[in-house]
Structures are given as structure tokens and as C-alpha cells.
Image (spheres, rainbow, N blue to C red):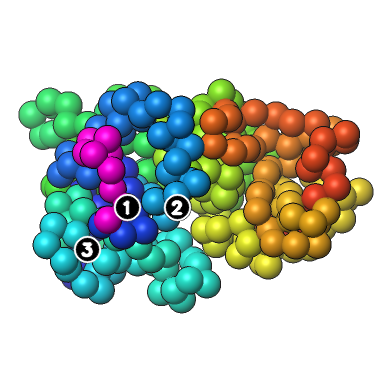
Amino acid sequence: MKKIRVSVPVATIWTSPESVRSIDAQAIADQPDMVAWLKTMTREETIALCGEKRLQSQVLFGDEILIDEVKGPWAKICVPTQYSTKDKRGYPGWMPLGQSVESEMATDCQQIKVQSNVATFYDLQKQPIFDLSFGTFLPLLEESEDEVKVDSPIGPGFMYKKDILMPVQQHLHTGFEIVKNAEKFIDLPYLWSGMSAYGYDCSGFSFSMLRAGGYLIPRDADDQALQGEEITLQSALPGDLLFFAYEKGKGYVHHVGIYYGDGKMIHSPTPGKIVSITVLKGSKYEEELCAIRRYWKG
């Protein structure tokens, strides 16, 4: 059955077509260049993505989208894998129509998962097409000693086994395994609405680490804080999600981190910062802590 799927490594979801600035041209191209886009922006321009609420989310290669409306080169969409109270069908926003394709990608196969921070996807002639982000899932077609043949929205291709996890290697992660994946991104610059190895926002980081571990949770921090198993701070274990609210924990939930153990959390803090490990005691987060939720099993 044909579905509309993302045909680029990372598609950025915008608040509206008018949200795009001239400096964002490389992000909205039919073949976006995330590295060049992020490198081109100044620190102030990167922070403005948040301050001016230009972005909503991102979605990875092969993920399904639903299109509600087409306006020129733009599509109003929602993302079924990203639960949100903004739209019960999935996270809403606008993305370039050219970054998606109608696809009959196999759905009855087991999936590989990209485990390296980024991994090259090759065509059938073994020529590199582009790099895929950690947490990308694709159907497995065949395997050999060092590589796999996978299906994709743009047709079959090859990847090296060193960059992926085979279906037999995948399982529901423990909290420690969630933290171990999170550690791979220490020092990665924050990106508002980011959902890839090129940059995460706070809830994009928790969503992506949990999804890589086999758990599909809501996209935004305030929605994440309402689900999962409620945990006390005394009972918190690595891999639990910590939520923080304005007004000393009584207001709107504005941040989420992953409990690291020993009174610390690993998180993507805020625009202009990097993924880091923070001691809770004595920090602003200590008085803003409002909820702890456990999604992982085992």
C-alpha cells in the first residue's frame, strides 16, 4: 500500500511557509544539507528559531507523514509517529513537498536501526547517496557478511553492518541502555525542534533516545509528563524522564531531561547550549522538578 514518506535524511517541520528565512534555504531544499545549514547560522540566528517559534519538529528518512493541504511547494502535514495533543493524528506543521514521496516501501519486513550517530546510505551501485541519522529505521531485505540491503522511500540501497543494529540485536532497552545511547551525543549543540543526530531539543532528545530503545512516547515535554509510570525522586533510576515547570514546579512544563543516576541528568538544555550532564542539586532545575516518568521496562 502506498504511503507518503520522508525522502530525505531529516525533514524539518515549520510553523508555516512564512517562517522560513533566507538563511534557511539549505534546510528546505529538495536535498537539504543539515550540516551546511547549521554551520551557516550564527548563534543568534540559531537561537531565533526558538525565540521566534519558526520550527515545530523534524522527521526522519522513511517515516510516514499525512498530508492535509498543499500550497505551492509546501505541504501541511502531521506525523503519526509523533503523538501530540496539538493533533491526535500526529505532530502538525508545514514541510517542503519535495522532501517527501509516495512510496510502496516494504512494511512486512523486519527493520534495521541506524546505531551510529550518522551512517551512509548507498545506492545499488554502491555509490553514496546521503548520510542517515541515528534512530532511522528501514526494512531489511537481504544481508551479507559486512552489509545489508534495505528498502527505502527512494528504492533499495545498501548500508554497512557496522553502522546499524540488525533485528536480532534489537530489544526493549533498559534505562541504562537508554542513557548509554544518550551519552553518544554529549557536546552536540541544541537545536530547537531538533529530532536528529544533527541537533536535538530537550523533548526531541528524550523522544529519540526512547524511540531508539523501542518505546514510542509523545513528542513534547508537557505531553510526555502526562504518560508513563509515575516515579518519586527517591525511586528514580537511569533512563527515567525528569520534567521541569515554571513557577518552581507549579507552572507550565518547559523542559525534560533523562535521569543519569547519582542526582544527575543528561539533557539538551536550551538554545545556545550543548547536550550535557547536569547535577540537579543546587541548580535551577532542583526547584523546578515537577514530575518523573518511567517508560522503559525491565
Q: Amino acid at mark 3?
A: Ala
Quote the CA–CA distance across marks 3 and 1: 14 Å
Number of numbered labels in the structure image: 3
Residue 290 shown left or right of residue 196 in the figure: right
Q: State whether residue 135 appears in this view.
A: no
Q: Quadrant of residue 282?
A: top right
Q: Which residue sits at x=42%, y=68%?
A: 90
- Name the residue at the right extreme: 234
Residue extending farthest to the left is 125
Q: Indicate which disc, 1 or 2, sits on the residue closer to the N terminus.
A: 1
Residue stretch in magenta: 18-27
Residue type for callout 2: Lys
- The residue wearing badge 2 is 53
Residue 49's quadrant in the figure?
top left
Q: Which of pointers 3 and 1 indicates the residue nearer the eye?
A: 1
Q: Amino acid at mark 1?
A: Ser
Q: Position of residue 296 (x, y in %)?
A: 66, 53
The answer to if 23 sits in the magenta stretch is yes
In percent of the image, x 54 and y 31: which residue is there? Answer: 272
114 and 161: which one is in front? 114
Q: Which residue is mark 3?
A: 75
- The answer to whether residue 275 is visible is yes
Q: Are marks 2 and 3 in contact (CB under 8 Å)?
A: no
